[in-house]
């Protein structure tokens, strides 16, 4: 089991990020990859989750590569921009597609296929999106919980991925300014090893529940609860790896009230 957790206090915000990943039953390799990091100097926090396609021989490496590309862009390119915008989001999508395609030869790229999603806090604004299935929840004080992936793929029965022919067009990120979420919000990313087992109505209660646990027990309490949850997960229909990450934003004066 892999776990990560960090807390950042910056410019009146308190940011919590964490994640848990567990290899699937009877599997030799965890094909999921994730990051849950903060960078106070850049006023930046992010979570990234990639789910390597089980039918591909080296999808664990592909998932890690997709995560590395996004993380590298966030750390090295995003700080050149004064704020998040739709244009910045489009640049991220373009760079991800270009670097992914350049990483592998045409005859081998299919062996590394993966889906990937990211959620970012940068100077008060939020970004969420990516490509493929799984779960990408966002909710807050003034923001009803919704699943970004369900909204985008509502009328599609095809699993999109980094090897999709039109990956540049399919990669999609949404930017939300602070005024939209009113200073208190949380984003949760998960692979389909988790999302497929959740009752839709229950899934949409997760953002409020995570924020409640953070308020009452702190990040250590939430991480422990997630660890126990994942370890005791019972699944009848699949043996997928299970990864879940969260990025919570709270105004400092609001946290703990």
Image (tube, rainbow, N blue to C red):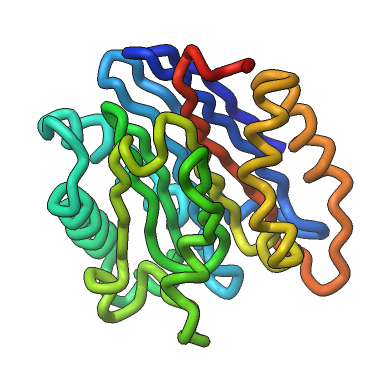
- Relative to 81, is 130 on the left or the right? right
Q: What x and y, as percent, mark residue 191?
A: 60, 57
On-image quarter of the C terminus:
top right
Q: Residue at x 24, y 73 (%)?
A: 169
Decide: is 221 above or below 180: above
Q: Can residue 220 be seen in this view?
A: no
Front residue of this view, candidates 102 and 50: 50
Task: Residue at 58%, 41% (x, y): give it.
Answer: 245
Residue 72 appears left or right of 121 = left
**Image-based side of 81 in relation to 215, left or right:** left
Relative to 7, say whether 172 is above or below.
Answer: below
Q: Residue at x 50, y 35 (%)?
A: 247
Q: Is residue 80 above or below residue 257?
A: below
Nearest the camera: 111 or 155?
Answer: 155
Q: Is residue 178 left or right of residue 152?
A: left
Q: How many numbered discs?
A: 0
Q: Can residue 107 be seen in this view?
A: yes
Location of the N terminus by quadrant is: top right
Image spot of residue 88 (x, y percent)? 16, 47
Q: Where is residue 186 in the image (x, y as percent from the top left)?
A: 52, 39
The residue depicted at 51 percent of the width and 55 percent of the height is 136
Which residue is more in the foreground, 58 or 82?
Answer: 82
Task: Examine the image and state in which quarter residue 193 appears.
Answer: bottom right
Q: Where is residue 226 in the image (x, y as percent from the top left)?
A: 75, 37
């Amino acid at each position: 089991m892999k776990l990560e957790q960090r807390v950042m206090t910056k410019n009146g915000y308190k940011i919590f990020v964490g994640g848990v990943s567990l290899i699937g039953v009877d599997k030799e390799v965890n094909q999921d990859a994730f990051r849950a990091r903060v960078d106070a100097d850049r006023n930046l926090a992010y979570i990234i989750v990639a789910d390597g396609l089980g039918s591909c021989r080296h999808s664990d490496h592909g998932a890690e590569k997709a995560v590395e590309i996004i993380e590298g862009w966030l750390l090295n390119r995003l700080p050149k921009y004064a704020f998040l915008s739709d244009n910045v989001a489009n640049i991220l999508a373009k760079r991800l597609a270009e670097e992914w395609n350049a990483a592998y030869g045409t005859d081998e790229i299919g062996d590394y296929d993966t889906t990937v999603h990211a959620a970012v806090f940068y100077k008060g604004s939020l970004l969420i999106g990516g490509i493929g299935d799984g779960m990408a929840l966002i909710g807050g004080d003034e923001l009803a919980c919704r699943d970004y992936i369900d909204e985008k793929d509502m009328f599609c029965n095809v699993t999109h991925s980094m090897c999709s022919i039109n990956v540049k067009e399919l990669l999609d990120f949404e930017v939300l300014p602070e005024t939209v979420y009113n200073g208190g919000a949380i984003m949760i990313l998960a692979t389909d090893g988790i999302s497929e087992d959740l009752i839709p109505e229950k899934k949409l209660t997760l953002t409020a529940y995570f924020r409640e646990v953070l308020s009452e027990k702190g990040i250590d309490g939430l991480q422990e609860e997630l660890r126990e949850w994942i370890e005791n997960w019972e699944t009848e229909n699949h043996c997928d790896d299970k990864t879940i990450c969260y990025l919570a934003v709270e105004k400092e004066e609001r946290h703990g009230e």
